[in-house]
Amino acid sequence: MKTIDRYILNELLQPFLFGMAFFVAIWLIDLMMELINLIFSKGVPSSVVFLFFLYSLPPTLVISFPMAILLATLVAFGRLSSDSEITAMKAGGYSFGRICAPAIAAGLFVTGLTFLFNERVVPVANDKFTRLFRREVTLKRPLPQIAANRFFEAGPGRKFYVQSYDPRTKDMFGVVMYEGQPTNFPRVIEAKKARLEEGRCLFWKGRISDFRSTGSDYHHTYFDELEYPIDTHYVNPDDVPESKNARQMNIVELYAHIKDLAQKGLTEKAQTQNWIEFWTKTSIPFASLIFVMLGAPLGSQTSRSGTSIGIGLSVVIIFVYYVLFAAGKAFAKGGYLTPFVGVWLPNLLIGAIGLWLIFRLKA
């Protein structure tokens, strides 16, 4: 490693560490408010809240790594430019591309570090956070026990009302189940008797009603006995399913999950969200390299140096990046772009601009 490489890497180190502290603190402010709210409004023990905080750190670090290396590059190259050191390096025979080389190497290192965190640490942290939150908050504190004249939840969008309850037989009487529909108006199941057991709800003597927007039911079906699938862990916190969502899987697990669903007949179009999550696991880490390629030429062209200038520029670039990222995902979900192109859109556009600026200043 030459002296110029060590010098530039040393210039990057301090603002990178400052950027990590700054952006992690920004991301954690909102989380801290929510965690404090859990202590005072939900009565969650402080030891459990501390675990929530620990499990939230790895995803926050993954988001902050690219932002911190962007800030470091803008600040370091801004200072080198304002002190005419880049001009001196060029006079010594170094091209701008060669001056950028150590920064690009640092960007590759941070990309690898982010990818490692995203694969080995984040899925485990997300899984532990989800399970702990479900057990200690969702399934325990806000949900009442089944009792007479009480409402309780039995899965997303499902609410029960019971007129009377026999705790010995676990039979519910005078039952009304309200179930929200993703595209239609709610469905209501009324029954004289019901019982929750083994992942299902058994109804006796009732009817199913589907409603118009006016409130009148346009279709109803009477039944003597009805078996309905129910997430029983919503009324029994110890009955927790083992299934993971895409954010709780690493890239290998998610790819295997996608292929398994494809073998079961699920089309690629139906798996768009899974593919979006798959490519997101690669695009976010590579944002570190992309930000270095843009930050080095931009920082070297600023007439003033300083952390405040770097923070201002980095906030603008990050804002543009995430606007493009959100737009790309929306186009991918709508079928206008493939998931890869949609998710990688900001990397491709900003990376192309960064390469153009580097070659423009290469001479």
Image (spheres, rainbow, N blue to C red):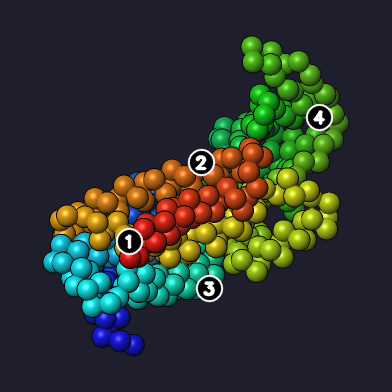
* C-alpha separation, residue under disc 3 versus residue under disc 2: 28 Å
* Image quarter (top left, top right, bottom left or bottom right) of the C terminus: bottom left
Q: Earlier in the sequence, mark 1 or mark 3?
A: 3
Residue 198 drawn at (x, y percent): 75, 53
Q: Position of residue 167 (x, y in %)?
A: 64, 47
Circle 2 — which element? helix
- The residue pinned by badge 4 equals 205
Q: Which mark is residue 164?
A: none
- Does residue 159 show up? yes
Sooner in the amino-acid sequence: mark 2 or mark 4:
4
Tell me the quarter of the image containing the N terminus.
bottom left
How much space separates mark 4 and mark 1, taking CA atoms? Answer: 79 Å
The residue type indicated by label 1 comes to: Leu
Quarter of the image holding residue 263? bottom right
Local SS, label 1: loop
Sequence order check, earlier mark of 3 and 4:
3
Q: Is residue 186 above or below residue 119?
A: above
User: Distance between the Cα atoms at labels 1 and 3?
Assistant: 38 Å
For the point 53% across and 73% down, the residue is 120
Which amino acid type is shown beneath numbered disc 4? Answer: Lys
| 232 relative position to 72: left or right | right
Q: Which residue is mark 1?
A: 361
**Extreme residue in the bottom direction:** 1
User: Residue beneath label 3, please?
Assistant: 120
| Badge 2 amino acid | Ala
Name the secondary structure under disc 3. Answer: helix
